[in-house]
Image (tube, helix red, strand yellow):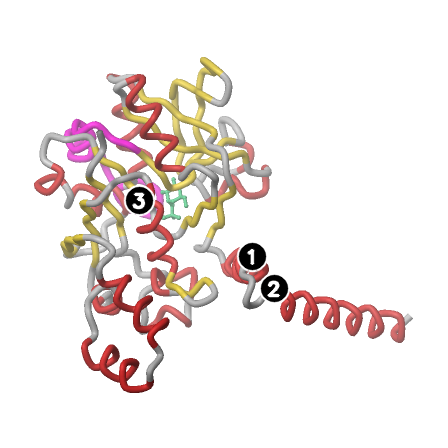
Amino acid sequence: MIKKAVIPAAGSGTRFLPLTKAQPKEMLPIVDSPTIQYVIEEALQAQINDLLIITGRSKRAIEDHFDRSFELEQQLKEKGDLKLLERIQQIANLTNIHYIRQKEQKGLGDAISYAEQHVYQEPFAVLLGDSVISAEESCIGQLIKLYQRFGASILAVEEVPPDKVHRYGIIKGQKIADDLYLLEDLIEKPKPNEAPSNLAIAGRYIFTPNIFEFLKKTPKGKGDEIQLTDAIKLMAKKHAFYAFKFKGKRYDIGNKLEFLKTNIEFALDRADFRDEILKFLQETLDKHQKAVENRQ
Ligand code: G1P
């Protein structure tokens, strides 16, 4: 059983500036909840209830979000908004969350190494905060099932077009079953002509604890940072490590355009917004169409 998950949330969010100048990127909203809440809910769905968030400077809003807020609860009680009160209390009661701070921003690999004492000698899950995944069975749950079958580390991948490989860690794998690969090589953010495939790491992993041994040996890589992908590359030379093309849809919140599209898609899924959003989209499209016709 996988009982522990690590959620790195220490990165500075430069890809989202200026919005992330004074607020954590993990608090960017998807409709009315911060992205990190969706990620935590995915872990809980897979029966993981011991969470460690790796934070850093200027990330206090994350801790406040998952804490009680007695003043706010009191205000909602006085206003009689019991539905919202219940939702706010639910967030604080989601689960036990532990926090540790990454002292310096030395990369994702370095951030994960802060989890060593907490996870100790158990296998554990890692969920990256900038990927929100909607799936019938949670993506991390799909990986856990495969971990139980093979007893080896595994990560989730998805196919991406060639012009997007430079955004992700790309794997080279030997196909051993439908959607399942044995890792042979990995490259973090390759140029399109260097990419060994179109299978991108999707921000979900299950690790056996010997990943820490390899993280310690990993030199600085892309962007002068200690890359998790490079540690996995070292580990895959010594231990079986699998990649699974998960079933579901991944939303890349680390990218501004994808973030905007995600908000529209999630709003369309909500009964309270669907009709109004559809009407707005239709009207906006018509207006643009007319403007194009007038220019011709
Ligand atoms: C990280 C990983 C990369 C992975 C990506 C998924 O990159 O290093 O391998 O494909 O997350 O979102 P980052 O987005 O932190 O630059």
What distance separates the C-alpha of mark 3 from that of mark 1? 21 Å
Looking at the rendered structure, the secondary structure element under dot 3 is: helix
Q: Residue at x 28, y 25 (%)?
A: 153
Which amino acid, by three-letter code, is at mark 1?
A: Asp
Q: Earlier in the sequence, mark 3 or mark 1?
A: 3
* Residue denoted by label 3: 43
Which amino acid, by three-letter code, is at mark 2?
A: Arg
Q: Earlier in the sequence, mark 2 or mark 1?
A: 1
Residue 220 within the segment the image draws in magenta: yes
Q: Position of residue 79 (x, y in %)?
A: 33, 86
Nearer the observer, 280 or 76? 76
Looking at the picture, does residue 266 appear above or below residue 245? below
Observer-side mark, 2 or 3, equals: 2
Q: Residue 256: which disc?
A: none
**129 with respect to 294 (left or right):** left
Looking at the rendered structure, the secondary structure element under dot 2 is: helix
Locate the C terminus and report the quarter of the image it occupies: bottom right
Q: Earlier in the sequence, mark 2 or mark 3?
A: 3
Q: Residue at x 36, y 71 (%)?
A: 83
Q: How many marks?
A: 3
* Residue denoted by label 2: 274
Counting other residues with Cα less than 10 Å from the Cα at mark 2, is it few (<14), some (14-19), or many (20 or more)? Answer: some
Residue 214 figure quarter: top left
In the image, the segment drawn in magenta is 206-226
* Residue denoted by label 1: 269
Counting other residues with Cα less than 10 Å from the Cα at mark 3, is it few (<14), some (14-19), or many (20 or more)? Answer: many
Q: Position of residue 32 (x, y in %)?
A: 43, 67
